[in-house]
């Protein structure tokens, strides 16, 4: 599901890493043996001793990178404030034009490109880590190309948002955060709507799923009919993830007319049809259970609290006469680094709340997927458990994350927990009613 990423992107345009949950790096491993022919469902997630050691090392490196990246982002913003780069960029913007929009068009790129370049080392290390653990096949030239495209897209969104933010700040210095919060809702909806149509194709190639996999498409249609929600074949896509990753994945993205289910070609290459049907059933659960609109409501509510906190801190730090760090006041362009710093810290502290919300949706989707394929796939618990086993082997899942790491960083239940639940979930034999698909 792409909701976390999309909400994180929008927040990053305005307030750096605010509200963005820990992004799981593209994960992969050397080709894992298919377990599709096993006689019974695996009761637990298991790895060979060598692969277990590798998975734990990779997980620890990713956890350390997350906290190091957060600390580095804070240090970068502190350095920008201490070096008074904000006032320098503001002065240059004011010399360039007297019109506020064109000042934003000069100031925002100067500040955000500087921040992005200074934060580049952690991104470089993250990709090097993925290459070292055979998680990525993407060359450095392609990686830098994606980084540049992401930055360009961010700036295209950031300039009008920064202009809007400071226009509201100038007109309503006390209640700006409420008006800006209201203005963000249609922007958030628009970003989620256009991302699969405009943004995603800049990074990957998408093709209709049915022509290349007619048997799978036919089986998928049976699953959608059983679940009581028809998803047209034109809403199902295959993504050429293998051009950059070795990991397996699938997700739901978009909103309204742009909503679609996307399955990575790496998933289709590694999983059997029954296993892929469970993966699809999981993603269809996000679709049917309205997780994207509900997620929008959740993130929008969290933004209310975040913006209120930013307003309180800005008023206390910059509301005193005389200014600080060369900043004239709250409505000065140069106050943006302070806003970014507050939002970065608040966003990190909000991670457990964000991830807990998304974890609950992912568990609901697991339940939906199991119920959707029940009766259509022989021994559906086995198919689902095998799908998780493949996912864990290929993606080098941490076999035993600590309670703190699970609480702070995990936006999915741990892989071992998901596999165990899939193998044991059986309301039908117990005379119980399924939760979603009846």
Image (cartoon, rainbow, N blue to C red):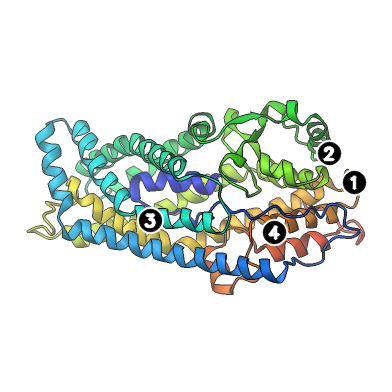
Depth order, front residue of 181/277: 277
SS for callout 4: helix
- Please tell me which of labels 3 and 4 falls first in the chain: 3
Q: Mark 2 and mark 1: span between their CA atoms?
A: 9 Å
Q: Is residue 175 left or right of residue 353?
A: left
Q: Which secondary structure, mark 3?
A: helix
Q: What residue did someone put label 2 on? A: 226
Q: CA distance from mark 1 to mark 4?
A: 27 Å
Q: Secondary structure at mark 2?
A: helix
Numbered circles on residues, count: 4
Label 2 neighbour load within 10 Å: few <14, some 14-19, many 20+: some
Q: Earlier in the sequence, mark 3 or mark 2?
A: 2
Indicate the quadrant where residue 393 lies. Answer: bottom right
380 sits to left or right of 123: right
2 vs 4, front mark = 4
- The residue that disc 1 covers is 375
- Marks 3 and 4, how far apart at CA: 38 Å
In the depicted structure, whether residue 205 falls above or below residue 188:
above
Q: CA distance from mark 3 to mark 2?
A: 42 Å
Q: Residues within 10 Å of mark 3 (few under 14, many from 20)?
A: many
Tags 2 and 1 touching, CB below 8 Å:
yes
């Amino acid at each position: 599901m792409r909701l976390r990423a999309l909400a994180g992107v929008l927040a990053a345009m305005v307030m750096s890493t605010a509200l963005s949950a820990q992004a799981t790096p593209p994960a992969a491993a050397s080709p894992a043996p298919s377990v599709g022919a096993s006689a019974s469902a695996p009761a637990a997630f298991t790895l060979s001793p060598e692969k277990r050691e590798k998975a734990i090392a990779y997980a620890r490196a990713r956890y350390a990178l997350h906290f190091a990246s957060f600390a580095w982002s804070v240090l970068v913003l502190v350095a920008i404030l201490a070096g008074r780069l904000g006032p320098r960029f503001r002065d240059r913007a004011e010399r360039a034009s007297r019109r506020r929009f064109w000042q934003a068009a000069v100031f925002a790129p100067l500040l955000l490109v500087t921040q992005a370049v200074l934060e580049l080392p952690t991104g470089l290390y993250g990709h090097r880590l993925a290459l070292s653990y055979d998680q990525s096949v993407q060359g450095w030239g392609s990686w830098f190309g994606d980084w540049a495209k992401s930055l360009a897209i961010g700036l295209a969104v950031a300039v009008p948002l920064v202009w809007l933010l400071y226009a509201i700040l100038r007109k309503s210095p006390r209640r700006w955060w409420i008006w800006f919060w209201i203005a963000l809702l249609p922007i958030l909806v628009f970003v989620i709507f256009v991302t699969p149509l405009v943004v995603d194709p800049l990074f990957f190639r998408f093709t209709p799923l049915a022509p290349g996999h007619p048997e799978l498409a036919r089986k998928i249609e049976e699953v959608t009919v059983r679940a009581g929600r028809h998803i047209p074949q034109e809403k199902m896509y295959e993504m050429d993830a293998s051009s950059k990753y070795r990991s397996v994945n699938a997700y739901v993205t978009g909103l309204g007319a742009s909503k679609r289910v996307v399955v990575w070609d790496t998933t289709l290459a590694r999983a059997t049809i029954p296993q892929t049907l469970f993966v699809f059933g999981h993603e269809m659960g996000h679709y049917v259970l309205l997780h994207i609109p509900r997620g929008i409501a959740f993130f929008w509510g969290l933004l209310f609290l975040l913006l209120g906190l930013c307003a309180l801190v800005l008023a206390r730090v910059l509301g005193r006469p005389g200014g600080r760090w060369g900043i004239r006041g709250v409505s000065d362009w140069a106050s943006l680094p302070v806003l970014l710093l507050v939002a970065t810290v608040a966003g990190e502290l909000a991670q457990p709340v964000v991830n807990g919300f998304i974890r609950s949706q992912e568990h609901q989707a697991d339940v939906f997927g199991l119920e959707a394929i029940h009766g259509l796939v022989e021994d559906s618990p086995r198919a689902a458990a095998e799908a998780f086993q493949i996912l864990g082997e290929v993606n080098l899942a941490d076999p035993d994350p600590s309670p703190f790491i699970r609480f702070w960083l995990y936006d999915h239940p741990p892989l071992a927990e998901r596999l165990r639940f899939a193998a044991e979930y059986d309301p039908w034999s117990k005379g119980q009613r399924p939760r979603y698909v009846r």
